[in-house]
Structures are given as structure tokens and as C-alpha cells.
Image: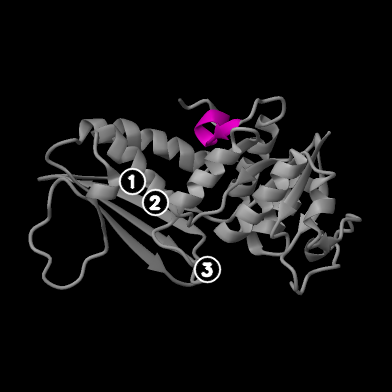
């Protein structure tokens, strides 16, 4: 039975991950981590759901990873990289859904994957990743004559923008079109911007309320508009995808994988 530890176990996503692991056959919850000083330290990892797991939330990374096959982490870039250092010491594989990494931080993940199995994806949802595949196909047919805009909406607590999923959508589209996203992305508009450059990919971010995650890609042509949309009603799809990714790592060699590898979409 695969032993899975959860980082950020008292957060909204962490609680969903804990519940999903507890409800998934052939895996078991082996540890629950939080940052030093967190209010939840010492509490049972399943207390939020009225369940007694016998797993106390702790900040003792070394002890938790010594008894885990996989660590699932949806925290913040700086925290993830600290957990990654410990995972390398213990040989604990990682599933990383954290967003907001700088390019230099992504390079650290790639370096660690030379000796460790890692699934890294900004969005673990099966639906989102199938949507990414649809965007890859659509972009190839809308290479000319269509303006591309990506609109995303999330809850008021999200700290990075655009979302990691929106950026991944942009990367998939740019690659399909033979463009470099870093060169063609436009992040928001204000003032007199001039006419739209048809080679650009636009991003707009909305933050408000308790929106879990909405993403729409618009291909706007003359006389028609095609929109491909994914909406998340709750975080369960992310958690289920993350546990599926953890199970995917069993027996896999070291490497940096993503959800397209997990789902066989390549």
C-alpha cells in the first residue's frame, strides 16, 4: 500500500487531499505537514472532517518523509523547494501542484528530477488536462485570422496571477503555433494600447469571492468566436488527479513528469 504524506495539510487544498487519500483504496495517509507555528500543529489530520486518523499535523519534515513513499504538495514555491530538499535526502517522490514558480525555481525542480520521480503540473484535474489537449488541436487550426485571449477567475485568496493553469494554456497554444510565450504574452491592458498585435496571446485575471477556478480561451475571428471553457465547482478534481499522479509514480524511474504523462495524452 502506497504511503502518502500531505504538505499544507490544514489548508483548503490540503484538507481535500487528506480526505481523498483516506477515501482511496490501495493508498494510506502516512503524514501531514504544516509550516512551523501553524495553528493546526498537533491536531489530527482528519479532525476537520470529524475523522480520527491517528496522524497528527506536524512540522517535522524529516520524520514524515522518512515514512512516506510520496509527498503531495500544493503550497507555495518557497515552501515546496524546502520540502524538495528533504525529499531528495529521503528519496521520497513528489507530486507538486504548487503554482507561481519563477523560471529559476522550475530549474531546481528539473535538477531534482534527475534523481527523484516528480509529477509537476499547475493543474492536476483530468478535465483541465483534456482541455489542454483540445486547445493544442484548436490552436493549430486558428493560427491566422484569430485573436487569442485567455481569461481566468479565482477566489480572493489566490496570490499569483495569471494562474498556473492559464499560463499552461498559453504555453500549449504558443507551442502549437510555433511562438515563444514569453515574447508574445500580454498581461492585462490599460490606457491607450493601440491596435491589437495579432501575434500576441492576451491574459486577463479576475479575483473575487470563493471562485475555485474558471478558465476560458477565446479564439476571436471575423464573424465568429470560439470559446473553450473549463470550470471547477470544487477542489475534489485536483485532489483526485494528484492521488492518481502519486500512484503513477510507483515503479517509475526518476524524471520530471506532468499530467499528460499520467493520463497518456502525449
- The circle on residue 191 is none
Quarter of image, res 69: top right
Residue lying at 71% horizontally and 66% vertically, measured from the top left: 35
Please, what secondary structure does the residue beneath circle 1 have?
helix
- Does residue 259 show up magenta in the picture? yes
Quarter of image, res 163: bottom left
Q: Which residue is mark 3?
A: 210
First-in-chain label (3 vs 2): 2
Rendering coords of residue 25 (x, y %): 79, 36
Q: Which residue is mark 1?
A: 170
Left or right of 167, for residue 69: right
Task: Give yes or no for contact between labels 2 and 1 (Cβ–Cβ under 8 Å).
Answer: yes
Residue lying at 52% horizontally and 25% vertically, measured from the top left: 264
Residue lying at 68% horizontally and 53% vertically, measured from the top left: 83
| Part of the protein shown in magenta | 255-262
Q: Residues within 10 Å of mark 1 (few under 14, many from 20)?
A: many
Residue 251 in view here: yes
Alpha carbons under labels 2 and 1: distance apart: 6 Å
Q: Residues within 10 Å of mark 2 (few under 14, many from 20)?
A: many
Amino acid at each position: 500500500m502506497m504511503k502518502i504524506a500531505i504538505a499544507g495539510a490544514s489548508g483548503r487544498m490540503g484538507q481535500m487531499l487528506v480526505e481523498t487519500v483516506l477515501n482511496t483504496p490501495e493508498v494510506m495517509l502516512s503524514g501531514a505537514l504544516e509550516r512551523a507555528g501553524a495553528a493546526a500543529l498537533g491536531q489530527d489530520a482528519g479532525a476537520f472532517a470529524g475523522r480520527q486518523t491517528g496522524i497528527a499535523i506536524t512540522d517535522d519534515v524529516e520524520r514524515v518523509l522518512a515514512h512516506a513513499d510520496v509527498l503531495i504538495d500544493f503550497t507555495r514555491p518557497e515552501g515546496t523547494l524546502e520540502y524538495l530538499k528533504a525529499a531528495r535526502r529521503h528519496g521520497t517522490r513528489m507530486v507538486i501542484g504548487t503554482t507561481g514558480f519563477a523560471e529559476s525555481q522550475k530549474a531546481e525542480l528539473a535538477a531534482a528530477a534527475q534523481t527523484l520521480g516528480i509529477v509537476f503540473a499547475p493543474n492536476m484535474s483530468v478535465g483541465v488536462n483534456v482541455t489542454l489537449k483540445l486547445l493544442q488541436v484548436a490552436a493549430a487550426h486558428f493560427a491566422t485570422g484569430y485573436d487569442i485571449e485567455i481569461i481566468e477567475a479565482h477566489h480572493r485568496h489566490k496570490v499569483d496571477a495569471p494562474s498556473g493553469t492559464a499560463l499552461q494554456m498559453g504555453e500549449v497554444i504558443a507551442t502549437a503555433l510555433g511562438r515563444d510565450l514569453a515574447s508574445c504574452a500580454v498581461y492585462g491592458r490599460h490606457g491607450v494600447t493601440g491596435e491589437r498585435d495579432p501575434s500576441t496571446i492576451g491574459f486577463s485575471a479576475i479575483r473575487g469571492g470563493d471562485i475555485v477556478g474558471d478558465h476560458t480561451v477565446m479564439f476571436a475571428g471575423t464573424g465568429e468566436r470560439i470559446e473553450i471553457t473549463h470550470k471547477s465547482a470544487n477542489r475534489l478534481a485536483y485532489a483526485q488527479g494528484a492521488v492518481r499522479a502519486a500512484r503513477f509514480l510507483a515503479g517509475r524511474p526518476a524524471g520530471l513528469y506532468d499530467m499528460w504523462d499520467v493520463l497518456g495524452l502525449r
